[in-house]
Amino acid sequence: MTRPPKLGRIVWIDLLWGVCMLWFRLLPVVIACTLGLCAAGAMADTPAVFLERLNAEARSAGEGPGNAARGQEFFNQSHGNEWKCASCHGAVPTGKGEHAVTHKVIDPMAPAFNPQRFTDAAKVEKWFRRNCKDVLSRECTAREKADVLTWLISLK
Amino acid sequence: MNPKKEPMSNPAFPRGAALTFLLCVLPAFVALARAEVAQSIKGAPASFTAECSSCHVAYAPSLTGQANWRGIMTGLDKHFGVDASLDSKTQHEISVWLLANAATSGRRAAASTDFRITRSDWFIRKHDEVSASVWKRASIKSASNCGACHSGAARGDFDEDSVRIPK
């Protein structure tokens, strides 16, 4: 009769080896993911980049760069419609806001309080377009956007 | 016993070890994947989940028929008083999926006056035991806030047994 192989230290060595092999096989994936994240990080827009762009756009329209005080006023002012920016985002958007209709929580707008803000060009374009239509019944000018962003960036 | 025989049985062990490790780790991956899935409707394109849930819970396509979905998706710039316009590619992708998965028969397929699901006959009938004061509670606030009582709303689960009306 053959006895089953004796299990002992050898199993632990093999287990470790198995884990190492698994990681070895996953290595290309891990490396690819890391590289991908780095590349995405390097290419991602930042609030400062957006502001620079908006300021340049405002200048080419013959207007000055963004102004924080003007941005704060714009954000908290009525522009002929029921809603202001502050209606959903709060008067000082360093904390959470709430959608005026659905009551869904809206994360802070100030980049210092929400690092995800102003990092995605398509998202920024989409929400400025929509929300300006709701608040002003038109799209905002580059200077208006620059004012608001200057203010938001200044909130620490 | 011939000690030289031992290494012969060795190759089976790493495989066994790898298998053991996988068995230990797989449940964690499955749990992670499930957690991800739990917040969206099965088979929905990422654009649907991302866009439709930015202001409210992403309503399951089977909650209303094609007529209502068409009406909603062609009027996104005036979406119940809010501009919810999308780029044409995203709008098309979401529309195709909604129409393919819309309710096709029964009360749910019927169109409502302003395309609102919450004004559909079936919705009103289903909720007729919920009094007006309950809808107004701070924890609910709106009939469109499905998730307040239906905890599975975000993944399209409206099972009556799991309804919990908050105080």
Image: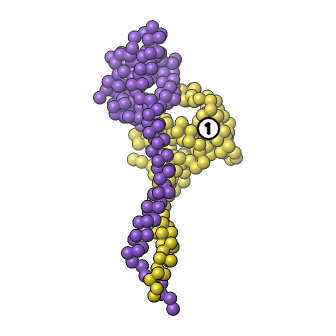
For image coordinates 49% across by 30% down, the residue present is: A123
Task: Please tell me how crowded label 1 is: few (under 14), some (14-19), or many (20+) other residues with Cα within 10 Å.
Answer: many
Q: Colour of chain A?
A: purple
Residue at the outermost right position? B105
Give whichever of A28, A102 is nearer the camera: A28
Q: Does residue B98 lie above or below A30 as drawn?
A: above
Give whichever of A102, A67 is nearer the camera: A67
* Chain that is yellow in the image: B
Quadrant placement of the C terminus of chain A: top left
Tell me if residue A10 can be seen.
yes
Along the horizontal axis of the image, is B43 left or right of B135? Answer: right
Residue B20 pos. (x, y %): 47, 68
Tag count = 1
For image coordinates 48% across by 46% down, the residue present is: A33
Residue A97 pos. (x, y %): 39, 32
Tell me if residue B125 can be seen.
no
Residue at the outermost bottom position? A1
Residue at the outermost top position? A62
Residue B161 pos. (x, y %): 51, 56
Q: Which residue is mark 1?
A: B94
Question: Residue type at mark 1?
Answer: Ile
Q: Which chain does tag 1 point to?
A: B
